[in-house]
Image (cartoon, rainbow, N blue to C red):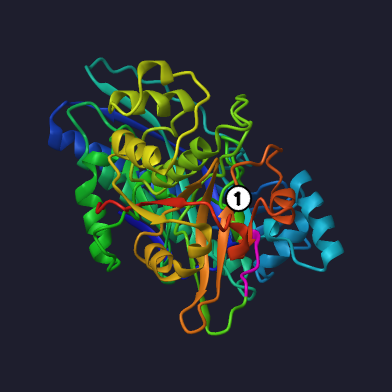
Amino acid sequence: MIVDSNRFEPGDFLRVRGPLELKCLLDSTDETLMHKAISRTFENLRSHVNSESCVLRVRDSPVVIWPNKCVHVTPKEITPSTPCEELHKWIQTEEQEIAGKRSAKKGKKSSATRVISLNLMTEVTKLGPLPAPILCRTIRKSYFLSTVLPMDCVVCISCTDTIKGACERLLEALTHQLHDMEREMLRHAKGMTLSVPEPFHFLLPESKGLVTAVYPAGVPDSQLEAQRKELHERFELPEDRPYFRRANAYHFPNEPYKDGYLRNPHLALTHPTLDDGRVYLVQGLYSYHHYMQDRLDDNGWGCAYRSLQTICSWFQQQGYVERAVPTHKEIQQALVDVGDKPGSFVGSRQWIGSFEVHAVLNQLLGVTSKILFVSQGSEMASKGRELANHFLSEGTPVMIGGGVLAHTILGVAWSETTGQIRFLILDPHYTGAEDLQVITDKGWCGWKGSEFWDQTAYYNMCLPQRPKAI
């Protein structure tokens, strides 16, 4: 199931994508004969990838590479021994041009130029005379299988890697991926019904690298647990956390999220420095939900709903649940369903608090939570150990409600020896556009001291617990 595994530095890779047509003529519905015919077709595709007709085109550039013609490259200024990083000079998109100007002002290298995307193509033009066509007519009963394989391979590169060396690794990765696609297609074949194999990339923890796995389209994650266990064993990963569900797939930095929400804005911040202190952060991806999103005016009453949505997005994007982030009305209906609120609550503008967040998480996601209570905000400074342990063991966002305000805690910087503490706060009261610079510069996502909390107000914190699942 593994296609390619490399030690990985984010942004330093080549990614080749493109369709390969799988066309297979079957003379029989016998399962053994059908599998042999499909295997022969995959073998032909592997030969095609390693033939001179295989072409790689660098996206948004004039660069074209024939990897099996002694690595022939155009334009002529580029040679097989040219370092891969030189290809960045030939790539130009509108986004990269803007990013490049910003980086030039700051004197920094743009992270957007670290992804080199290539198209997998086929050269169809032939030089010289073509043979005369020969027509044959054969009358027999047969079946024709046709589908498109979505090839998607990634290899990591360093500043010293040449185009020739990288192309050799890309061809090897494409060949391996075709082997894995063949295995998955045959494994999940049911009679004449075949599932199209799809590749997914996963960035594993502890520098294990970027790994590619192939899953059959249309087969839900719930039916792929055996394959995931196999992967966890191979990479010595714990079996109580999902790493290989589709929702865990790595999101490449040069691709925008389709839903429009910002992900992990806290990554743009600089950590505070405390004497003998450590930083404990949320683990994984979440979406920033705040006032006025989704064409809903909830300014003044929806902050806890938005904090809950951020928490739900975390469970969705870690692969624990497949359902969409609930709307305000769905949250209200869940509270009615569990008997916490009357039917008139649905469609209202009534506030909710930490206990309601706990109830909704359990009702809609099957997630349990712990409630941490402080009688006044001045006690928040003493909760460093509890919050640090939570982010170490569970790693989920924490919803905190007090008085009429709700916030999301994404981490703490805490010194066990001095007791100093800073809270990483994601503020759902923001009403503006999804502008990361404004959100971080204005403190809507930022590190706050103990004075941030109302010193005399009580606070309840909802600490969602991570399910034990693979």
Q: Is residue 171 visible?
A: yes
Q: Nearer the viewer, residue 340 or 440?
A: 340
Q: Is residue 79 visible?
A: no
Q: Residue at x 59, y 67 (%)?
A: 164
Q: Position of residue 49 (x, y in %)?
A: 46, 50
Examine the rendered structure and indicate whether residue 416 appears above or below residue 58.
below
Q: The N terminus lies in which quarter of the figure?
A: bottom left
Quadrant housing residue 69: bottom right
Examine the rendered structure and indicate whether residue 129 appears above or below residue 241.
above
Q: Position of residue 55 (x, y in %)?
A: 58, 49
Q: Residues within 10 Å of mark 1 (few under 14, many from 20)?
A: many
Q: Is residue 117 highlighted in magenta?
A: no
Task: Write the start and end of the magenta stretch as one range.
Answer: 268-272
Q: Nearer the viewer, residue 464 or 349?
A: 349
Count of numbered circles on the image: 1
In the displayed image of the protein, which residue is found farthest to the right?
105
Q: Residue at x 46, y 80 (%)?
A: 416
Q: Nearer the viewer, residue 459 or 251?
A: 459
What amino acid is labelled 1 in the image? Leu
Examine the rendered structure and indicate whether residue 86 appears above or below residue 362.
below
Examine the rendered structure and indicate whether residue 462 appears above or below residue 7.
above
Quadrant housing residue 73: bottom right
Q: Nearer the viewer, residue 202 or 271?
A: 271
Q: Is residue 271 highlighted in magenta?
A: yes
What secondary structure prevails in the magenta region?
loop
Q: Indicate left or right for 5 with 30 as reference.
A: right
Q: Position of residue 349 (x, y in %)?
A: 53, 24
Residue receiving disc 1: 118
Q: Position of residue 178 (x, y in %)?
A: 37, 49
Q: For the residue labelled by badge 1, is the local secondary structure a helix, a strand or a loop?
A: strand
